[in-house]
Image: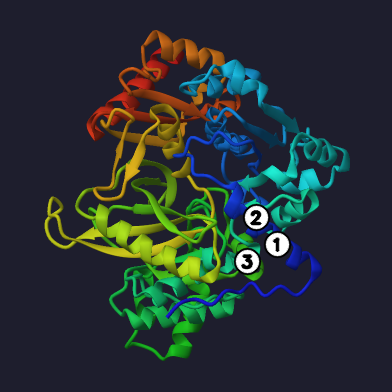
């Protein structure tokens, strides 16, 4: 059974948007393809998500830099790229990315890159800032030839669709009418349809009373349950999750009292939720439930569990491609906040992840979805931790570029290589296998005050920069976060997982020595 598309054009603008989207088939080319045709690409790295939730992430105002690896498109000699940000990018950061481009002078690429800024640091999505500035909109329009261009973004909402229509540019992203399939509740529905194992859980609710009833239902489905996770339907990077410890509430456990009494008792229990964000409180979280909705889900226990993910793409021609797998590095009070990842996922379940991702992608494609998607899992070993047999539970679908997107783009940019779905490995242009460890969250207080140029001095002196001859080394992102927040992103590319991790540790040591004296 496949999901039927929710896109039923009813207005003139919806019809126009669908007409624009059909043009992507002729304009889009994979980054694996050396394209000599003239192309015009608008990159709008807007985090068009709940802005209050985003403020839980330190330095989130610099996360628009994460799509700078889109500059890989400039290796095609006739591609022109327009990149828009809320605040101007530091010139040295732009130069850094251009100098990473292999096979083309950075000056040649720079001539085909146009940068715009809204000069607005407010808590609004970048796309909204652009739409509120007619003159900036006109400058962007003049910088692009619409008949040869398209627009790409971090995630798609009605704002991105409106910008697409205003500029008459097709949008390389999922239609906002399909965003339900990327929510927590929509993900669970896709998993059910695909027959993919996932934790028992509830339907979407919008009140505290309904949430208490949903928790009671889930507990009754799994009477031995120790902990349960409550998730905002549109949480970001695990920051919208909260954990409920059921051990103190055994007096109302299944088999002891009625469902009604259990639900009443759980209304008080919800005030004891343990939040993944240190800034969150129950009154504020309860308000978010009323606006965003929430689900209750069984918390998968396991002393040695992993958090793998699979990334894919649905092309404008409707083809589903698997792009990568990762083992994610999670942190926070209960290990639910995304910190980084390692490529590829363990060989024990790597190919299984790809097969499950293919099934999800086919279901999404049948619904009319487009572009990037990711599926997060929990993996628990069936036997000993070192065993090769694992239970996989699908957790959620992300219909956007995510924390695992830019590390892969970095490796593709630096090595001119490709992902091989047959074995789940990445091969350089010289057919050598490469691995990486990446993070958005290398953060220490004593890194504050470092400028991007200081970072380069440290890295070059320790010979940790990327070596294009050997095909190993480190690429950085989120450099704009460094001075104010002491926070940095990096992708460490090595000849083995151990080598990639060694490079990561060497960067940490070099920065510590340089800043602590």
Secondary structure at badge 1 equals helix
Write the residue at 40% across / 33% down.
411
Residue behind mark 2: 23
Write the residue at 59% across / 34% down.
65
What x and y, as percent, mark residue 327?
Answer: 32, 47
Q: Nearer the viewer, residue 426 or 407?
A: 426
Q: Nearer the viewer, residue 478 or 310?
A: 310
Which of marks 2 and 3 precedes in the sequence? 2
Residue behind mark 1: 19
Q: Nearer the viewer, residue 177 or 441?
A: 177
Residue behind mark 3: 292
How far separated are the C-alphas under marks 3 and 2? 34 Å
Against 415, is 394 above or below? below
Against 370, is 419 above or below? above
- State which mark lies toward you, 3 or 2: 2
Q: Is residue 517 visible?
A: no
10 Å neighbourhood of mark 1: few (<14), some, or many (≥20)?
few
Write the residue at 54% across / 31% down.
76
What x and y, as percent, mark residue 384?
Answer: 12, 56
Res 82 quadrant in image: top right
Q: Is residue 14 visible?
A: yes
Secondary structure at badge 2 equals loop
Residues at discs 1 and 2 in contact (Cβ within 8 Å): yes
């Amino acid at each position: 059974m496949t999901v039927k598309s929710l896109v039923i054009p009813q207005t003139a603008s919806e019809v126009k948007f669908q007409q624009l989207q059909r043009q992507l088939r002729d304009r889009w080319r994979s980054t694996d393809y050396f394209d000599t045709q003239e192309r015009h690409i608008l990159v709008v790295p807007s985090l068009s998500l709940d802005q209050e939730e985003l403020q839980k992430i330190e330095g989130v105002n610099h996360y628009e830099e994460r799509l700078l690896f889109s500059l890989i498109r400039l290796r095609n000699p006739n591609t022109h790229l327009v990149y828009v940000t809320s605040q101007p990018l530091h010139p040295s950061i732009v130069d850094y990315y251009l100098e990473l481009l292999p096979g083309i002078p950075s000056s040649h690429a720079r001539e085909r890159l146009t940068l715009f800024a809204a000069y607005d640091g407010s808590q609004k999505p970048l796309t909204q800032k652009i739409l509120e500035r007619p003159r900036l909109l006109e400058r962007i329009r003049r910088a692009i030839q619409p008949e040869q261009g398209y627009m790409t973004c971090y995630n798609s909402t009605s704002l991105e669709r409106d910008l697409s229509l205003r500029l008459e540019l097709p949008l390389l992203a999922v239609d906002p009418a399909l965003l339900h399939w990327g929510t927590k509740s929509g993900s669970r529905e896709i998993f059910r349809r695909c027959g993919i194992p996932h934790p028992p859980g509830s339907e979407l609710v919008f009140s505290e009373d309904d949430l208490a009833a949903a928790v009671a239902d889930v507990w009754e489905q799994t009477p031995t349950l120790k902990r349960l996770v409550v998730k905002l339907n549109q949480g970001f990077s695990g920051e919208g999750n909260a954990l409920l410890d059921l051990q103190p509430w055994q007096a109302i456990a299944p088999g002891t009292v009625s469902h009604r009494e259990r639900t009443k008792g759980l209304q008080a229990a919800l005030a004891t939720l343990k939040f993944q964000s240190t800034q969150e409180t129950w009154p504020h979280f309860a308000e978010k439930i009323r606006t965003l909705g929430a689900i209750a889900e069984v918390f998968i226990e396991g002393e040695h569990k992993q958090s793998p993910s699979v990334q894919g793409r649905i092309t404008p021609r409707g083809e589903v491609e698997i792009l990568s797998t990762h083992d994610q590095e999670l942190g926070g009070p209960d290990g639910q906040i995304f910190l980084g990842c390692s490529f590829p996922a363990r060989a024990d379940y790597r190919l299984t992840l790809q097969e499950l991702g293919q099934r999800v992608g086919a279901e999404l494609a049948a619904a009319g979805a487009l572009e990037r998607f990711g599926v997060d899992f929990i993996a628990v070993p069936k036997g000993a931790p070192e065993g090769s047999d694992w239970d996989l539970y699908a957790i959620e679908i992300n219909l956007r570029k995510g924390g695992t997107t830019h590390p892969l783009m970095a490796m593709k940019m630096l090595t001119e290589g490709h992902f091989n779905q047959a074995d789940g490995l990445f091969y350089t242009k010289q057919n050598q296998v490469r691995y990486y460890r990446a993070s958005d969250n290398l953060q220490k207080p004593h890194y504050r005050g470092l400028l991007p140029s200081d970072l380069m001095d440290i890295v070059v002196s320790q010979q940790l920069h990327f070596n294009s001859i050997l095909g190993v080394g480190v690429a950085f992102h989120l450099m704009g976060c460094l001075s104010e927040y002491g926070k940095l992103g990096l992708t460490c590319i090595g000849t083995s997982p151990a080598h990639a991790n060694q490079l990561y540790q060497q960067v940490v040591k070099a920065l510590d020595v340089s800043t602590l004296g």
